[in-house]
Every structure is written in structure tokens, then in C-alpha cells.
Amino acid sequence: MSTKKTGILLANLGSPAEPTTAAVRQFLKEFLGDPRVVNIPRPLWLLILHGVILPFRPSKSLRAYKKIWHPEKGSPLTYLTKQLTEKLALYYQPKGVEVRYAMRYGQPSIASQLAQFKELGIEDIIVLPLYPQFSSTTTASVYDDFVKEIGKWWHFPSFRFIADYHQHPHYIEAVANSIKAAWQTHPKNQLLVMSFHGLPEQLTVWGDPYYHQCLRTGALIAEQLGLAADDWKLVFQSRFGKAEWLKPYCVDVLEALPNEGVKTVDLVCPGFAVDCLETLEEIAMENKALFLEAGGEEYRYIPALNDSDTHIDVLVSVLSHS
């Protein structure tokens, strides 16, 4: 670490402030209004966003959020990120390092947390987006927002931006060990499915490394587990819109597996640092129902690393050696 007063900023995507249509609409407006997230001509997209999506999608998304919303803690992504940050802060407290978290969309914002750092006299900042794999739609957007805010300061702090940790050995080992732990409580199912959030295929053509980093992460986890090629499968979830997205699509694979003789699956999402709507509602609920309706017999979701002590060890290692 630097001899200057240091601050660590963990960044995640964000969630609606509360489970209401208005809050979900505000979150989607900010999220889907980010040019990094949707890569189609701006005037056309804004017309679609405000004329088609925002009037109707919030109510559908709200139903999904209500399924996973904790009555006291709120959105899982928010409270798990907060708990993870608090535990990491305890580790760094004796070293005099300030640790905070920010959300790219929603609160606490990157701007508000940087303002706190400035008041505390932080001169050296380490930014760690909680996205193991780099994507222009997520990691780069955090960078954009961070640099925009720092650019308003009269005196810039030193900073280090950690772009990804998709093949960091401690991260790979931690995910593999979480899968092993699940298999110790219940014998492993026929197939391990690793699901990553999807992106439009065109982004890979343009040079986004996300697809290749996902493949690398999956292969390393399988290697750590000693799996043969037919013991696991990598898929992509959460397709949005009509464009071609990264394949194979998770839902298509899950629907087809029972007819191919695979009746039991374990599913893990190595691209998510903490559980959220896409893992708890889409993967653990919706896709489970889809698999069982297609003839599957057993479906087990293996949680993200969340605020586990193991995850703290991973982040400390990433922060120290990246």
C-alpha cells in the first residue's frame, strides 16, 4: 500500500432504493440510460427507453425484486455489498486504510463516496469494481464515472483501478471450494453449469474481452475441480432485446438437458461477486422452474461468495497483488 492516506472503493452495479414502481423506474432510467450499457444510436435508444421500456418494464421488474427483497435489509445486492465492505474495512482498519463501497447506479453513488474520501484527506485511491470479468458495459462504466468525478478536483489523488481478476488464483480457488463445499453437503449432480451474464455478441467483435475472460474463468474452475469436458457446461444468461447475445443461452441449455439424459444439475454464477436479482430470482427461481418443467429432477443453485471470510481473503489478495 502507499505511504499516503489510502482509500479503497469497492464498486457494484446498484439496485432500486425500495421495492416500488417509482424506485424501479428511476433505477432503470439511470442504468439503461448509460451509453456504456446499450450500444445502439443514442436518439433511437432514448426513444425506445422512454416510450416503450420505462412505461411498462418497471412493474415487471418490481415483481421480480419483491421475490428476493429482504423486509429489513432491502436488496440483496446492496446489503451483501455493504456487509462485504464492512468486513473488509475491519481487516484494513489497523492499517489506517479507509474502505467504502459505491453503486454505479443508485446510492451510495461514486460521487458521494469520493466526496467523503476528499473530506478525509485520502490521497491514494484503489478502485475495485466487483466484476471479476472486465466488460465495457460494467467495469468501463465505473471507470468513466470515477474519472469524471476526480476530474472535478483541483488536486488529483493518485489512484489505481483494478480492471478485472478473472483468473486470479485465489478467486478461482475460492469459487471451486464453494462448489466442493456444496458437494460435501449433497453429492454432486450430473452436470455443473457455470452461468455468466450475457452481452451482445457485437461487443466481442469490437474488442470487449468479457467473453474470452468468462471462458478462461470457467476453464480454470473446472481444472481446479478436476472435471472432464462433459462434466460441466458454460452458458450465458439474462438476454435482453432481440440482438444476438453470447451463446449458448442458459435457458435453451436448461430446457434441452433433460431430453439429453441430464436430469440433475448444479448451477453456479462465477461472474457475480454477491447474489442479486439475476442469481436469486432468475437463476435460482425462474430457471429452476424451467428446468423442472422440461423434465429435470433436481436443480441446485450454489451461492456467490457474498460476504464470506473466503471472499475477504480473495479481495485482500486481489488488492495486494493486482
Image (tube, rainbow, N blue to C red):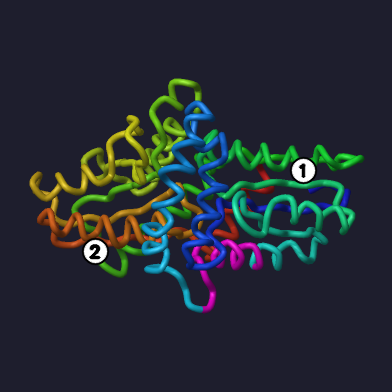
- Distance from disc 1 to disc 2, alpha carbons, whole Å, reads 49 Å
Is residue 221 a member of the stretch shown in magenta? no
In the image, is residue 45 above or below residue 109? above
Q: In percent of the image, x 62 and y 54: which residue is there?
A: 103
- State the residue position of label 2: 187
Mark closer to the observer (1, 2): 1
Graded by Cα atoms within 10 Å as few (under 14), some (14 to 19) or many (20 or more), the crowding at tag 2 reads few
- The residue lying furthest to the bottom in this view is 72
Quadrant in the rendering for residue 309: bottom right
Measured as percent of width and height from the top left, residue 283 is found at: 32, 56
* Residue closer to the observer: 269 or 282: 282
Q: Quadrant of the C terminus?
A: top right
Secondary structure beneath disc 1? helix
What amino acid is labelled 2 in the image? Pro
Of callouts 1 and 2, which one flags the residue occurring earlier in the amino acid sequence? 1
Tell me where residue 167 appears, x and y as whole percent: 50, 40
- Residue 75 lies in the magenta stretch: yes
Residue type, label 1 = Glu
The residue lying furthest to the front in this view is 51
Q: Which residues are magenta?
A: 72-86
Give left or right: position of 251 versus 27. left
**In terms of depth relative to the viewer, which is nearer, 76 or 224?**
76
State the residue position of label 1. Answer: 149
Which of these two is toward me, 178 or 78?
Answer: 78
Could you say which disc has been placed on residue 12 in the image? Answer: none
Taking the spot 79% from the left edge, 58% from the top edge, the residue there is 97
Identified at 27% across, 58% down, the residue is 286
